[in-house]
Image: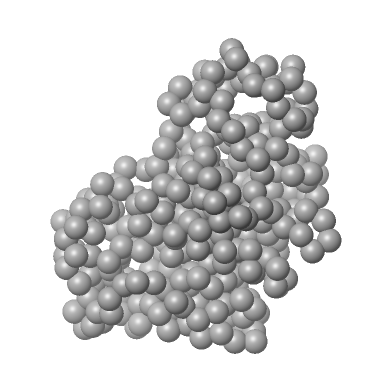
């Protein structure tokens, strides 16, 4: 991972986030090589940490979908002060900004929906239909719209143009990957898959967001999904990331999104494992591959 090894006797470790989410609390409770992990806001981290310490950035998108939560500047300052920062600001922005995500995945040669930016609602481009509109900094399935023809596109653009996030960054148009009613979310830590789950959309819904009622179940991801998730994580530069994969038919997958502040539940654990402990162990640099953890490969 390109970071120096510090003595756990002197190093302070913190998760930097604004919310004590269930995922952040669970990760912190697992500790770092047996040592305590603090949960700090960006400002708290900047005031209390210094050279030789380590932080895991977990800043999410803003509630208004208008960018990344406040605090990336603090992570940059920590880097300058000699603090090791996992999920660095450039990597976090690359994952949260779906336009940058599309570009990074394309450069890596990974399957991802064709994506273009629309900045004016009154000049809709020619698209292949159906198409999906979504905010550049989106989450929870909010303001994600399916357009089946140009008339629906024009109507949707007019509606979305009133959102503050549209005025800031425009809207993305993506080709629709024909939905099969479910997707896979894989948790990648230090380059290895440490957890996975299948998300199934509720009846009448094509989106698989849990916030929209999708169900979650434990799954053992096939090797092709593991390989694709690891490649997507490497392209993003993130140390802990959620990779969402849509099935494209027998044995095929497409990377649909990356999440730099991914939330996950105990059900993501492989059988007999603890996904939170495995993630923290992998990040600490001591994760070893096992038969029980398909794809949970040694940290690099």
The residue located at (53%, 67%) in the rendering is 188
The residue located at (71%, 27%) in the rendering is 127
User: x%, y% of residue 139?
Assistant: 54, 43
In this picture the colour scheme is one colour
Depth order, front residue of 293/126: 126
Left or right placement of residue 207 versus residue 104 in this view: right
Vertical side of 183 occupied by 52: above or below: below
Left or right placement of residue 49 versus residue 267 in this view: left
User: x%, y% of residue 161?
Assistant: 54, 19
Q: Quadrant of the C terminus?
A: bottom left
User: x%, y% of residue 76?
Assistant: 25, 52
- Quadrant for residue 186, please give it: bottom right
The residue located at (34%, 72%) in the rendering is 2
Depth order, front residue of 53/104: 104
The residue located at (35%, 57%) in the rendering is 88
Depth order, front residue of 210/108: 108
Instruction: Answer whether residue 82 is visible to the viewer in this image.
Output: yes
User: x%, y% of residue 109?
Assistant: 61, 55
């Amino acid at each position: 991972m390109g970071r120096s090894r510090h003595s756990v006797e002197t190093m302070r470790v913190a998760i930097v986030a604004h919310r004590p989410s269930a995922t952040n609390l669970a990760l912190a409770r697992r500790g770092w090589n047996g040592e305590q992990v603090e949960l700090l806001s960006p400002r708290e981290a900047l005031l209390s940490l210094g050279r030789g310490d380590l932080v895991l950035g977990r800043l999410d998108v803003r509630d208004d979908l208008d960018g990344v939560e406040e605090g990336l500047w603090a992570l940059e300052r920590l880097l300058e002060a000699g603090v090791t920062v996992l999920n660095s600001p450039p990597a976090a922005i690359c994952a949260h900004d779906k336009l940058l995500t599309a570009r990074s995945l394309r450069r890596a040669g990974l399957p991802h929906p064709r994506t273009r930016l629309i900045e004016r609602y009154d000049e809709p481009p020619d698209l292949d239909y159906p198409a999906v509109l979504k905010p550049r900094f989106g989450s929870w399935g909010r303001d994600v719209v399916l357009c089946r023809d140009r008339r629906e596109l024009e109507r949707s653009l007019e509606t979305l143009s009133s959102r503050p996030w549209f005025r800031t960054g425009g809207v993305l148009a993506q080709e629709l990957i024909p939905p099969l009613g479910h997707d896979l979310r894989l948790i990648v830590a230090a380059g290895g898959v440490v957890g996975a789950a299948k998300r199934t959309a509720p009846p009448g819904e094509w989106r698989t967001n849990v916030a929209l009622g999708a169900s979650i179940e434990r799954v053992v991801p096939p090797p092709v999904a593991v390989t694709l998730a690891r490649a997507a994580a490497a392209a993003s530069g993130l140390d802990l990331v959620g990779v969402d994969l849509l099935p494209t038919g027998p044995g095929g997958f497409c990377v649909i999104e990356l999440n730099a502040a991914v939330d996950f539940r105990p059900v993501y654990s492989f059988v007999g494992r603890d996904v939170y402990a495995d993630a923290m162990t992998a990040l600490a640099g001591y994760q070893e591959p096992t038969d029980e953890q398909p794809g949970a490969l040694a940290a690099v």
